[in-house]
């Protein structure tokens, strides 16, 4: 490898039985307003796996997947303060350009967050998509308050695991759903009650736990029938945040319920081109890193994936199957 190339993991084409391949690619150069990140670690997320199956209209093949990374800034584009050089940062990058399963990536400087010295880069890499999604939902959309009750669906996953801890840090009561094998884990994160969605009647248990009053807010990562049910488990004027688009409201008297319905789309900051939303990615990153530094939240369990195409492919298929507790993180430092 020369100073103008890098090692990366690429997707030759999108398909159900996708397999990534190792490749040597040109090393990217930062454009105006961008920084270049020498990546130490890159998190895997459900969106990465889904796009390996379905693709993206802006992708050119082969494509480097991945949206989350932590590393060190080693180059800056025109108009970017040289003080960024050498800083350890996290980035949640746009879906369309070449991604983070590589040694380097470029991204706008206004959307990255500086990692405190006490936080290692593998831990830092586990944060952007999952933790920022959870924090955006709780703090920007649901505006969760101390004393309120929040129902979190799929609480053993990345977003759910961070959301449980963040909600408790805000002083809320947390009712969470999880499989029986993950119940103890979710309880260990701080959930006040864990409902086994496979063997219990979720609606009946929520009504029992709230003495029939319902919950103040819902964070839904399941969609479908569960989302339709959960809308009806909220108090009047309750707040509903969906990770999977608009819920089905068929048959629900919305005037009697008056719910606030929020679609959580972290990457929408890039799709929309909204600079204020992109800058808020950096602010949310700062806030989440501060919570971690202050021990208000803890890192989720991390499974480190070695920089090997077969191992990375297997890890992405696990992500797609929804069998991941905590986070999977691709370690890239050994390639540098």
Image: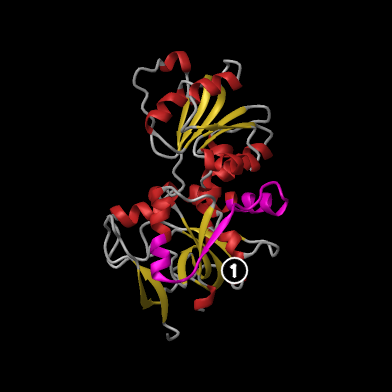
Identify whether 229 is placed above or below 115: above
Residue projecting furthest to the bottom: 2
Please indicate, yes or no, whether residue 133 appears anywhere in the rendered image: no
- Residue 58: in magenta span: no
How far across and down, in percent of the image, does residue 297 sit? Answer: 66, 47
- Whether residue 312 appears in magenta in the rendering, the answer is yes
The residue sitting at 39% across, 47% down in the picture is 272
The reply, left or right, for residue 312 in relation to residue 130 is left
Q: Callout 1: helix, strand or loop?
A: helix
Q: How many marks?
A: 1
Q: Residue at (55%, 28%) from the top-left corner? A: 217
Tell me where residue 30 sits by quadrant.
bottom left
Q: In the rendered structure, which segment of residues is drawn in magenta?
A: 285-314
Q: Is residue 171 visible?
A: yes
Nearest the eye: 16 or 253: 16
Q: Which coloring applies here? A: secondary structure
The residue shown at (58%, 16%) is 213
The residue to which callout 1 is attached is 84
Residue that lies at the very extreme toward the top in this rendered image: 256
Query: With respect to residue 194, does 30 lie above or below?
Result: below
Residue lying at 30% horizontally and 60% vertically, measured from the top left = 18
Q: Residue 268's x, y, as percent? A: 42, 47
- Density class for disc 1 (Cα within 10 Å; few <14, some 14-19, many ≥20) is some
Residue 53 at x, y percent in the picture? 30, 54
* Residue situated in front as seen by the camera: 290 or 281: 290
Front-most of residues 4 and 305: 305
The quadrant in which residue 314 appears is bottom left
Q: Quadrant of the N terminus?
A: bottom left
User: Residue lying farthest right?
Assistant: 294
Instruction: Give the image location of residue 277, x and y in percent.
Output: 49, 47
In the rendered image, the vertical position of residue 150 relative to residue 296, given as above or below = above
């Amino acid at each position: 490898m020369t100073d103008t190339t890098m090692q990366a993991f690429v997707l030759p084409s999108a398909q159900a039985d996708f397999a990534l391949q190792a490749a040597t690619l040109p090393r990217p150069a930062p454009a105006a307003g961008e920084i270049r990140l020498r990546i130490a670690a890159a998190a895997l997320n459900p969106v990465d796996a889904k796009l390996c199956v379905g693709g993206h209209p802006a992708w050119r093949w082969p494509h480097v997947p991945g949206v989350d990374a932590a590393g060190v800034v080693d180059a800056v584009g025109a108009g970017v303060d040289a003080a960024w050089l050498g800083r350890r940062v996290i980035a949640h990058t746009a879906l369309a350009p070449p991604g983070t399963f590589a040694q380097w990536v470029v991204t706008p400087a206004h959307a990255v967050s500086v990692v405190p010295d006490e936080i290692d880069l593998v831990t830092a890499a586990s944060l952007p998509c999952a933790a920022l999604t959870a924090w955006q939902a709780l703090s920007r959309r649901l505006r969760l308050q101390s004393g309120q009750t929040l129902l979190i669906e799929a609480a053993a996953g990345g977003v759910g695991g961070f959301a449980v801890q963040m909600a408790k840090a805000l002083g809320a009561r947390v009712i969470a759903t999880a499989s029986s094998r993950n119940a103890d884990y979710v309880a260990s994160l701080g959930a006040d009650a864990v409902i086994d969605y496979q063997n219990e009647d979720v609606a009946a248990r929520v009504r029992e736990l709230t003495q029939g009053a319902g919950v103040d807010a819902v964070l839904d990562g399941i969609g479908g029938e569960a989302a339709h049910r959960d809308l009806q488990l909220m108090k009047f004027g309750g707040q509903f945040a969906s990770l999977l688009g608009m819920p089905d409201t068929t048959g629900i008297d919305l005037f009697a319920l008056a719910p606030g319905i929020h679609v959580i789309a972290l990457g929408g900051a890039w799709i929309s081109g909204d600079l204020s939303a992109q800058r808020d990615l950096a602010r949310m990153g700062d806030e989440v890193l501060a919570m971690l530094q202050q021990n208000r939240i803890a890192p989720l369990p991390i499974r480190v994936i070695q920089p090997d195409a077969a191992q990375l492919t297997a890890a992405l298929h696990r992500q797609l199957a929804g069998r991941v507790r905590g986070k999977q993180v691709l370690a890239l430092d050994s390639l540098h």
